[in-house]
């Protein structure tokens, strides 16, 4: 057993920290306050070659391991959850299905520019009437000559207003239930594809989330990803990997809450002493740090399983479940430690508290994570 | 074509040093290490000049054998090769020892036009290694450099020095040595491929045995204690009368005279 990161992973972490100090932290408040999408940061992520970390160099990626990618998402999210999630959605949700199920031609055409950061990707599964019950999707794809015609609407689609390409899950054969779902590659700007308003969110406010509506949206037949009927499997496998990414996002947020709490509690003086000298505060800090460490081990272990080619669905679900609930619980504690000032806009813990919540919801809710874990154990 | 040697020191990350409040001892059990801050500027400047004029950059360091970790860090920042001059005894070396060790190794195996060092290290900031190394190599040296240009003849280097009482521009025939200030450039953050590629770059492992010499210290450290800052927790109002009280307090503490 070995708990050491490689020298490369340590160097990448140090690099991301420096990057965050220089470019991400200074923008984070604006990103939150103005729901501002930090395109300039995305450009810089590209320059650092962080937009295709776990994919091979032949597809424009860096050819590093998944754990390296996870560390990058963690550190970015520690400074700004919007930035961490934007990269996560791009890498795990949009690029992964192309890498895993794309033909060589599809990879060259779409995965290469995604990995090189020439465009961002988006993944559209959820619908107004089909969230957790993804199989209830009503978006349809009908083959008409050499083209598929897509109709329907997708809800809460991250990165959609800025995406160069979408992976869209649609029903090709309603009679087959989840086995009737298929995955499609839809380039941004395809006629009939309309992206709605940037939704006004509680947290990760700079991340652009919108409805995506398809009205007789025609794409060439060769844009089917995998085979007809494989859509549900593609979506579930994609989410399995993505959950490690969301765990990393949650971990970054929780770590930031801990960092802020340690610093503030040493500075804030009440009754003539720093509040860190009170046992009540000490215990909160001890609990926070222990949770964060446990979340980190679960998250890194899930990434390690991925890198080793071991099954990781259960591990990813455990990591996401624990890390997201840690983030939600510990950002709450962080505000408690800060007292009134923590409730005021412009203080980092106030933002962290709002940013944490979404990690318990997207890419599968905590309830779904418990279903996945118990499903693995009880079969 | 320039052959440049960038010297760097692997130091304790001061952010990780904790202090025992009672004894004022430095607690070092959990410290991390990094390339000394200004040495990153030295490496960056070497790489920048190489990109402009062609040539080679070698990153050279003197340290304990356990400092191997520093190599990928340095190499990910652009140099083609590293000289790892190491021995288990190379711990807490004095500037004079470091300079002497570097001089022996450089004389023995390197051809160079320019040597760039950081102005001082993040731990000791003695500002000695650069000038002492230049002295031992018998080459000219400019310290406190915040701008560096290669003369058109390519035989001289022009260095802008930031001094207490103004700027000074000097020109030195190559080979020469400069020590740089952090204003000289902004070190790039290595890209992912640079980090992953660092392991493939050659490292020359140079041991004490290879140097064929010993290097004696001349200083004796009697103790290291943390500096303390005590807050007086005095409160003042903002009116005219209080300004005098503040001045009185500052005088009493010896902050102003
Ligand atoms: C900011 C944001 C970004 C998003 N980005 C994307 C994206 O990029 N792409 C995408 O496809 N989707 C995206 N989503 C959608 C997200 O994945 C869904 O919101 C999530 O899966 C939950 O679906 P729902 O909102 O329809 O909730 P519902 O499914 O309606 O769930 C409501 C509640 O019921 C519970 N529940 C539902 N079914 C069960 C059950 N069988 N047993 C027990 N409890 C159950 C849920 O856990 C939850 O607590 C995003 C959502 C948000 C808010």
Image: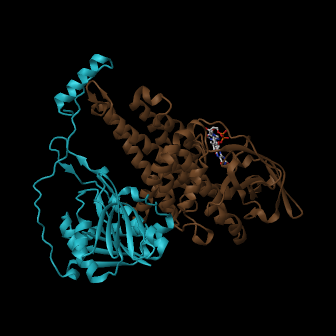
Chain colours: A brown, B cyan
Q: In the image, what residue occupies the spot 45% across and 43% down?
A: A254
- Is residue A260 shown left or right of residue A316? left
**Residue at position x 9%, y 55% in the image:** B222
Residue B46: which quarter of the image?
A: bottom left
Residue A299 lies left or right of residue B112; in this view the side is right
x, y percent for residue A131:
68, 43
x 55%, y 48%: residue: A83
Give how far across and how far down residue A49 sits, in percent.
54, 62
The answer to whether residue A1 is seen in the rendering is no
Looking at the image, in which quadrant does ligand 1 appear? top right
The total number of labels drawn is 0
Q: Position of residue B138 (x, y in %)?
A: 24, 76
A224 left or right, relative to A361:
right
Q: Can you say whether B175 is above or below B226 in the image?
A: below
Q: Give the side of residue A140 with respect to residue A239, left or right.
A: right
Viewer-proximal residue among A358 and B38: B38
**Vertical position of residue B197 compared to residue A38: above or below:** below
Quadrant showing the C terminus of chain A: bottom right
Q: Considering only vertical position in the picture, is B106 above or below A286?
A: below
Visible in this render: residue B152?
Answer: yes
Q: Quadrant of the N terminus of chain A?
A: bottom left
């Amino acid at each position: 057993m070995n708990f050491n990161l490689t020298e490369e992973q340590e160097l990448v972490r140090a690099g991301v920290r420096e990057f965050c100090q220089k470019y991400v932290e200074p923008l984070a408040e604006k990103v939150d306050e103005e729901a501002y999408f930090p395109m300039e940061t995305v450009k810089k992520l590209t320059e650092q070659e962080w937009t295709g970390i776990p994919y091979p160099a032949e597809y424009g990626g860096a050819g590093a391991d998944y754990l390296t990618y996870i560390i990058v998402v963690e550190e970015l999210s520690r400074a700004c959850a919007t930035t961490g999630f934007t990269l996560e959605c791009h890498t795990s949700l949009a690029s992964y299905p192309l890498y895993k199920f794309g033909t060589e031609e599809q990879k060259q055409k779409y995965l290469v520019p995604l990995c090189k950061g020439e465009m961002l990707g988006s993944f559209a599964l959820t619908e107004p009437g089909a969230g957790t019950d993804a199989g209830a999707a009503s978006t349809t794809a009908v083959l008409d000559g050499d083209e598929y015609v897509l109709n329907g609407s997708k809800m809460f689609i991250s990165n959609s207003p800025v995406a160069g390409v979408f992976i869209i899950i649609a029903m090709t054969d309603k009679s087959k239930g989840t086995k009737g779902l298929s995955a499609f590659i839809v380039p941004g700007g395809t006629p009939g594809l309309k992206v709605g308003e940037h939704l006004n969110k509680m947290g990760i406010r700079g991340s652009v989330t919108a409805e995506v509506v398809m009205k007789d949206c025609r794409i060439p037949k060769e844009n089917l990803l995998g085979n007809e009927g494989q859509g549900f499997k593609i979506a579930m496998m994609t989410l399995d990997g993505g959950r490690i990414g969301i765990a990393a996002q949650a971990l970054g947020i929780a770590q930031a809450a801990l960092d802020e709490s340690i610093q503030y509690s040493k500075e804030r003086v009440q009754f003539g002493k720093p509040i860190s000298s009170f046992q009540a505060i000490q215990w909160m800090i001890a609990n926070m740090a222990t949770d964060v460490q446990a979340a980190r081990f679960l998250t890194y272990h899930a990434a390690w399983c991925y890198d080793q080619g071991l099954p990781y669905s259960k591990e990813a679900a455990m990591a996401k479940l624990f890390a997201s609930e840690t983030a939600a619980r510990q950002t709450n504690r962080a505000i408690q430690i800060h007292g009134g000032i923590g409730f005021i806009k412009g203080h980092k813990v106030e933002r962290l508290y709002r940013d944490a919540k979404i990690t318990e919801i997207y890419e599968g809710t905590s309830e779904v994570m418990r279903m996945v874990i118990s499903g693995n154990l009880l079969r | 074509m320039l052959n440049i040697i960038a010297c760097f020191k692997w130091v304790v990350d001061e952010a990780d040093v904790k202090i025992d409040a009672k004894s004022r001892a430095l607690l070092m059990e959990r410290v991390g290490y990094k390339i000394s801050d200004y040495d990153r500027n030295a490496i960056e400047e070497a790489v920048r000049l190489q990109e402009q004029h062609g040539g080679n950059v070698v990153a050279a360091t003197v340290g304990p054998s356990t400092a191997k970790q520093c190599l990928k860090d340095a190499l990910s920042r652009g140099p083609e090769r590293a000289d790892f001059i190491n021995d288990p005894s190379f711990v807490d070396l004095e500037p004079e020892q470091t300079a002497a060790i570097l001089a022996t190794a450089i004389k023995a195996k390197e051809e160079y036009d320019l040597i760039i060092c950081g102005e001082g290290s993040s731990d000791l900031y003695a500002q000695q290694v650069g000038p002492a190394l230049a002295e031992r190599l018998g080459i000219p040296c400019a310290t406190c450099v915040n701008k560096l240009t290669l003369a058109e003849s390519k035989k001289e280097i022009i260095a802008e020095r930031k001094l207490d009482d103004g700027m000074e521009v000097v020109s030195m025939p190559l080979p020469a040595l400069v020590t740089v200030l952090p204003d000289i450039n902004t070190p790039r953050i290595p890209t992912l491929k640079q980090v992953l590629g660092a392991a493939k770059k050659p490292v020359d492992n140079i041991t004490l045995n290879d140097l064929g010499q010993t290097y004696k210290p001349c200083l004796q450290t009697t103790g290291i204690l943390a500096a303390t800052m005590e807050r007086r927790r005095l409160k003042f109002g903002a009116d005219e009368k209080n300004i005098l009280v503040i001045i009185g307090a500052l005088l009493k503490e010896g902050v102003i005279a």
